Image (tube, helix red, strand yellow):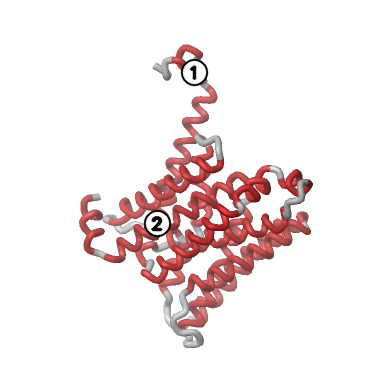
Amino acid sequence: MYEFLIDLQRHAFLQHALAAGILASVASGVVGTFVVVKRISYLAGGIAHSVLAGLGAAVYLRESGYWPGLDPLYGAVVAALSAAVVIGIVSIRAKEREDTIIGALWAVGMATGILFIAQTPGYNTDLMSYLFGNILMVSRQNLWLIFWLDALVLALTVLFYNQFLAVCFDSEFAQLRGLRVQAFYILLLCITALTVVVLTTAVGIVLVIALLTLPAAIAGAYCKTMRSMMILSALLCTVFTTSGLVLSYKPDFPAGATTILVAGIVYLGVMVVRSVRSRFPLTDHESATGGR
């Protein structure tokens, strides 16, 4: 811990990593709440794994000289939004084929990304870091892109909060009231797609769904409103990403995997405590005295 704090003052890459974790936590807390409440983590998983196709294509274009200076995250944004729209339309119009389409996009996205990786000149560590997560590789340019993606996600969430709330809890009633449920559902998936891109820089594609859902699931155990759930989820995500960075620094562990491990341990602890409390509820006297 002490060594990390000392190096944090001296090394820009650690400062960028810490900033990336905090920025990623903002979108994760907000959108993760929608994903957990709406129970669409499997949809988010399909979007997340489609991102590799965009990353692979962008890196291939950059390294082959067709588009010098192209940031792979731009390719990730295009791939994620495309997958979100396709999944949204299919889930609305052909529910019986929903699982098949998601599985196909999941597999095709990963396969396409791997093919681009194979054709990219040289061994590209950037793509490996996006796949498994390497928050220490985040550049200043990446930080600005994450910041603007965060700002867009927050702006859309604030602007259409009530509509998203209706879509998550009672879409049929909302449709009867005249709300364009299908359009807002696809917009919610697009916001989820942008958040997936943001989180990919922190923990990688493989672990992105865990960071999107675990903090929100923990927050849901203690919060009664969506707004409070979002705030607590964002705070928890900040704690997890920062803890993962600190704990992994000295032993040189993968920061993304360490972050998810911390989040997973806390989640399991919360579930165990809740299970014990449900089996052995406090008596009226214990409740009145705070369990003393």
Is 228 located above or below residue 283 in the figure? below
Where disc 1 sits, the SS reads: loop
Label 2 close to label 1 by CB (< 8 Å):
no
Q: Position of residue 35 (x, y in %)?
A: 59, 50
Q: Residue furthest top?
A: 285
> What residue is drawn where x is 54% and y is 25%?
278
Disc number placed over residue 92 in the picture, else none: none
* Camera sees residue 39: no
Q: Earlier in the sequence, mark 2 or mark 1?
A: 2
- The kind of residue tagged 1 is Leu
Q: Position of residue 264 (x, y in %)?
A: 46, 45
What is the crowding at mark 1: few (fewer than 14 residues within 10 Å), some, or many (at least 20)? few
Q: Position of residue 108 (x, y in %)?
A: 63, 69
* Camera sees residue 171: yes
Quarter of the picture holding the C terminus: top left
Badge nearest the viewer, 2 or 1? 2
Inter-mark Cα distance, 2 to 1 = 38 Å
In the image: residue 254, left or right of residue 35 = left
Q: Which of 213 and 279 lies nearest the eye of the viewer?
A: 213
What is the crowding at mark 2: few (fewer than 14 residues within 10 Å), some, or many (at least 20)? many
- The kind of residue tagged 2 is Gly
> What residue is drawn where x is 42% and y is 57%?
23
Is 4 located above or below residue 216 in the figure? below
Q: Position of residue 53 (x, y in %)?
A: 57, 71
Splitting the image into 4 quarters, where does residue 109 fall? bottom right
Disc number placed over residue 282 in the picture, else none: 1
From the image, tell me which residue sits under label 2: 21
Is 237 located above or below residue 45 in the figure? above
> What residue is drawn where x is 42% and y is 68%?
142
